[in-house]
Amino acid sequence: RLEKDIRMRQVPSIQEQRLKLLIRSFIDTHVHVESTMMIPENLSRAILPWGTTTICTDPHEIGNVMGIEGVEFMLDNAKKSKLRQYVLAPSCVPSVPGLEKFGAAEIGRLLDMDNVVGIAEIMDYVGVINDTERMHSIIEEGVKRGMFLQGHAPYCTGKELAAYLIGGPVSDHESVSEDEVRAKLRAGMHINLRASSLIDSLSFLVDGCKDMPWRDFVSVCTDDVHAKDLLTVGHINKVVG
């Protein structure tokens, strides 16, 4: 009886056991936190209840206003949330040729920070296609660190798309037609199907994937989503619902 009592005491109670569950959750593959008018820790409170556990963010909007200091704030504040937040270094701050404040040195500095996983949407696709010194040096900072290079190339097909891919970017969320989705998938590009508060082209973008035998390189994103939408209709759950 004493031996039995000892064995029973070694079995933890239900309250003492840590219950671990594996459940499906949502990932937003491209979003600007600033568009929600929230800071990262508050965005976490807004979208975790909707089932989003991970986001990949581009803080170029705060970068436009506050430079590297603003990006550092987003990184630090994200640590206060339960939401997994992967941050990309903004490549075009601002996205006006000739007025950019971030060059290769600034991008390199950002890429060496914790939780920065790559270079954000490389919007100067003309510069990439033409292999300008500025874009070449910025992309090189990511390439030599083996980091993710996020693309941004609307209306880009044919030779221009081939040149853009050779330049380094591997993804795109700016397709404007189902034919463009097909062309980019066939070229080996990862496609983010966008449904935002500003642009919702999901229906015809999905049509571009339907006849593709493999959809491993397809994901969804919100890009710019407003706080009211997060409150009333949700986040990625609304996109895939």
Image: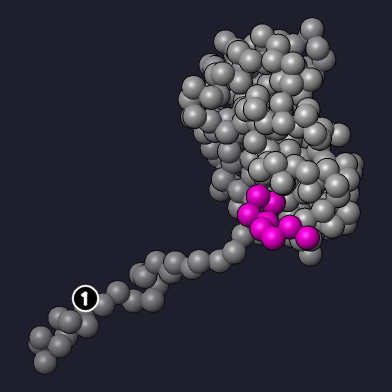
Residues shaded magenta: 211-218
Task: Give whichever of 172, 9 is nearer the camera.
Answer: 172
Which quarter of the figure is the C terminus placed in? bottom right
In the rendered view, tell whether residue 78 sits above or below residue 141.
below
Q: Position of residue 112 (x, y in %)?
A: 49, 22
Secondary structure type for disc 1: helix
Check the image and name the residue furthest to the left: 2
Q: Position of residue 155 (x, y in %)?
A: 86, 34
Q: Main secondary structure of the magenta part?
A: loop
Residue, x 56% and y 66% (percent of image)? 23
Which quarter of the figure is the N terminus placed in? bottom left
Colour logic: one colour
* Residue 105 seen: yes
Residue, x 34% and y 76% (percent of image)? 13
Residue, x 79% and y 61% (percent of image)? 210
Q: Position of residue 172 (x, y in %)?
A: 73, 38
In the rendered view, tell whether residue 38 sits above or below residue 178.
above
Q: Number of marks in the image?
A: 1
Q: Position of residue 122 (x, y in %)?
A: 71, 26
- Image quadrant in which you'd find residue 125: top right
Q: Is residue 117 magenta?
A: no
- Image quadrant in which you'd find residue 154: top right
Amino acid type indicated by mark 1 = Gln
Task: Give whichever of 154, 15 is nearer the camera.
Answer: 154
Task: Give whichever of 188, 6 is nearer the camera.
Answer: 188
Residue, x 79% and y 48% (percent of image)? 182
Q: For mark 1, what is the residue?
A: 10
